[in-house]
Structures are given as C-alpha cells and as structure tokens.
Image: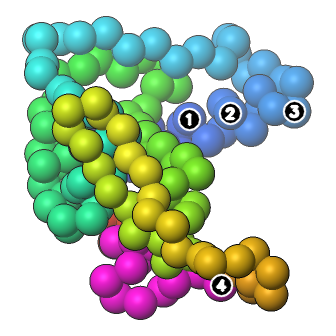
Amino acid sequence: MDFQKQLAHTRKYAEAFWQHEVIDRPYIAVTAPIRPTAYRWSPTFSAQTCLNESYDDILKPFCELVENTYYAGEAMPNLELTLGPDQYAGFLGGKIETSSENYTTWVLPCLDSIEGFHAVIDESPDGYFMKLKNISFLI
C-alpha cells in the first residue's frame, strides 16, 4: 500500500468527517490481520527502547506488523508512543527507571522542594525528551 497516497486520502475524509460532511460514504477505518504477527509493546518496553536508543527493537517488529495487516477505508498504521507522568518527569530531567518484571516505570526523586521550581524541558542530547524526539523522526 502506498501510505503517502493513503495519507492524503485519509486526511481528506477525516477533514470532511470533522466538518460533519460526507464525501461519498461514511469515514471508516478497518484493519484485519493478513498473517499472524508477534508484536509486543508495553510502557516499560517503550521506555527502555527510548532510554537505550535501540529503536529497531520497536520499529522492525512494527514494520512486520504493518506488512501483515490489511488496511481498509481510511485506516493507517500508527505507532503509539504513550506518554504518562513518568515520561513528563523525564522531560524535566527526572531519571526514569524500568522493570521488566512488573511492566512499569517510575522516576527517581529529582527535587528536594517544589518551592522555586521552574519547569524547563531537558533538551540535552542524552535526555529522555531528545531520545523520544529521535524515534519520532524515524517513523
């Protein structure tokens, strides 16, 4: 499937949908597996991938999933990068810890006091924000 062409088609139908208009049929997005594909994802796995900058660990299986999925109507592949409170704390410089045993993340305390705190996103090359930004450019 030519996803660049599909993106233009989907955008056209989505814009009509949000304007309460119908072009020639209802806006619909349907996916179905062509072949079974093992694709694993969890918040911990996603966080570990970004922290380790091992993006292929997510992107290669995701590409296999896309290749083995039928997209109908306005359906498009999407890779969800879920951001929770830990990730936002990571953007501000908090150190994110992960656990593969209980599939969770947490942030080590990074402030002694909230008084006088001014939130500034940590855009250093090895910060979590830049690592997440880097994977978004690869998609």
Counting residues from the start of the chain, the first of labels 4 and 3 encountered is 3
SS at mark 3 in the image: loop
Whether residue 128 appears in magenta in the rendering, the answer is yes
Residues under numbered marks 2 and 1 in contact, where contact means CB atoms less than 8 Å apart: yes
Residue 10 located within the stretch drawn in magenta? no
Nearer the observer, 122 or 15: 122
Q: Which residues are magenta?
A: 120-131
Which label belongs to residue 128? Answer: none
What SS does tag 4 mark? loop
The quarter of the image holding the N terminus is top left
Where residue 138 sits: x, y (%)? 28, 64
Q: Secondary structure at mark 2?
A: helix
Of badges 1 and 4, the one in the foreground is: 4
In this rendering, which labeled residue sits more in front, label 4 or label 3? 4
In which image quadrant can residue 134 be found? bottom left
Q: Amino acid at mark 1?
A: Thr
Q: Which residue is mark 4?
A: 120
Disc 2: which residue: 14
Magenta span: predominant SS is loop
